[in-house]
Amino acid sequence: MSASQQHCELNHILDMGDNSTLAVVYSLRYFGLRYSYYHGYICAFLCTYGIIANVINIIVLTRPWMRTAVNIILSAIAICDIGTMVSYFVYVLHVRLIHSDFPCHSDVYTYSWLLYILFHSLWSIFLHTTSLWLAVLLAFIRLCVIRRAKIATTVMTPVFIGRLIFAVCFGITVFMIPISLVNSVKTTDPRNRCAHEVNQTLYTIDLSEMGMQNNCLLLRVALWISGILFKLLPCVFLTVLIWGLLRTYKEARQRNKRFRRQSAQNQPAPYTYTMDQKCRGSETAPLTLGVPIVPDRRESTLLQHRATLTAVGSVPVSRATSMCQAPAFTSRTTIMLTSILLIFLLTEIPQALLAGLGGFFPDVYFTIYPSVGEVLDLLSLINSSVNFILYCSMSSRFRATFVYIFWTRFWLKETSRSQGSQSLHDGLGMNLAVGILATPKFKRYVLWRRKHSMYHQQSTQLTVLNGVSRQRLL
């Protein structure tokens, strides 16, 4: 606790005269000191990977055929994560990697650098709180969409979601004002920082004059806001909403099982269906020979295979029914989003507990947080960088779009240039990638782009795949 903070009459719960309390505090300080040697390298790696991964997330989730209410919120969370990791990477690079062996170096405690650290702390609080409340908004919207399917098309439009995101950012900005006024950059005695004599002016971040007025009233308000409103309350909401999602998912599975049992009892002998008979309007069109089936040749620029565009092949009734049912797709999406929200909750609970206690007993915050603050920062960085792995492992639509954008599209361009009119023997990448392109949203996007003259100049190119002429989308 700084000298300025000691002038405030704050609530205390820790008895620093008790041997058990001192043992715990000193153990935490020892742990924090030992971990600090590795913190810079670990966080530099996580920030580098997380920035690249979140840029990929934004590129994939903002494709026209991927723009849904959920994906818009996930893109906003990715933007917040990028801002957090860029700011933290600059901080950890300067303090932990470049000047880690020189804690009293003149470049560490300069006025301009301390201003950046103050900005970094406020910026990180704002972005991290925004992403946390956006996760709450994501869980709430998903729960509403599952229980009231009509909301997804009538209310949860991209414009409405954008307004909700703006409202969240604006509300957090308003509550950030007291926090931004609490601290300021002040000069400090070099003997408090350095073991050896330093002939220069050093600066530190301490309570501002406004923060110490009225028995540190502004400091109390800032601790309540950051501890309760920014940490504890969203974690409580996330817990309730995740429980609601899991309960809804369990009920949906039970209904699915009852439906399958009833279908099995009343099912006639197996026979075949075409897409027009059974899967009209379905977002999960069945695949034949690894290529999506498209109902209308004139409205599509997808590749042809060795069968007609409307052929489905021999598919039993139960298989065709399961391929066309929306609950299967809904369940997979719910599982993925629940996993993302659970990681949010698990990484935020330690910070929420510490910040919540700090709101009522500031001595807990000022005594314990300096020892475990870097570990809590590590949890936040893990939370910010893990979403790409979850998307790739749990969302086939994300994987297909990712492969199409970053591999198939450019690989076929280079191959067509080098091979000319020769056959492209490897069509596996395209077959995997274009599975998403059979969705109605992508076909509407194709029709929209056809209305523009530039689209006609860029969208058609004949290639040869497996000896069959195909027309593909650039």
Image (cartoon, rainbow, N blue to C red):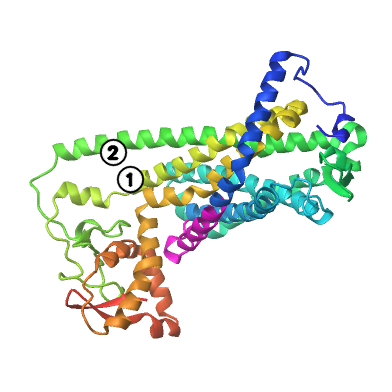
Q: Which residue is mark 2?
A: 256
Q: Left or right: 101 with respect to 106?
A: left
Confirm whether residue 377 shows in the render. Answer: no
Task: Give the x, y percent position of residue 120.
Answer: 71, 51
Image coordinates for residue 387, horizontal then vertical, percent: 48, 49
For the residue pair 221 and 444, the one nearer the viewer reads as 221
The residue at 22%/49% (across/down) is 321
Dominant secondary structure of the magenta stretch?
helix
Q: Are marks 1 and 2 in contact (CB under 8 Å)?
A: yes
Front residue of 440 and 222? 222
Disc 2 residue type?
Answer: Asn
Picture residue at 61% right of the left edge, 36% below the top: 35
The kind of residue on which mark 1 rests is Pro
Quadrant housing the C terminus:
bottom left
Q: Quadrant of the N terminus?
A: top right
Part of the protein shown in magenta: 47-68
**Label 1 neighbour load within 10 Å: few <14, some 14-19, many 20+:** some
Q: In the image, what residue occupies the spot 36% across and 33% down?
A: 251
Mark 1 element type: helix
Which residue in the protein does label 1 denote?
A: 327
Residue 20: x, y in percent?
A: 69, 15
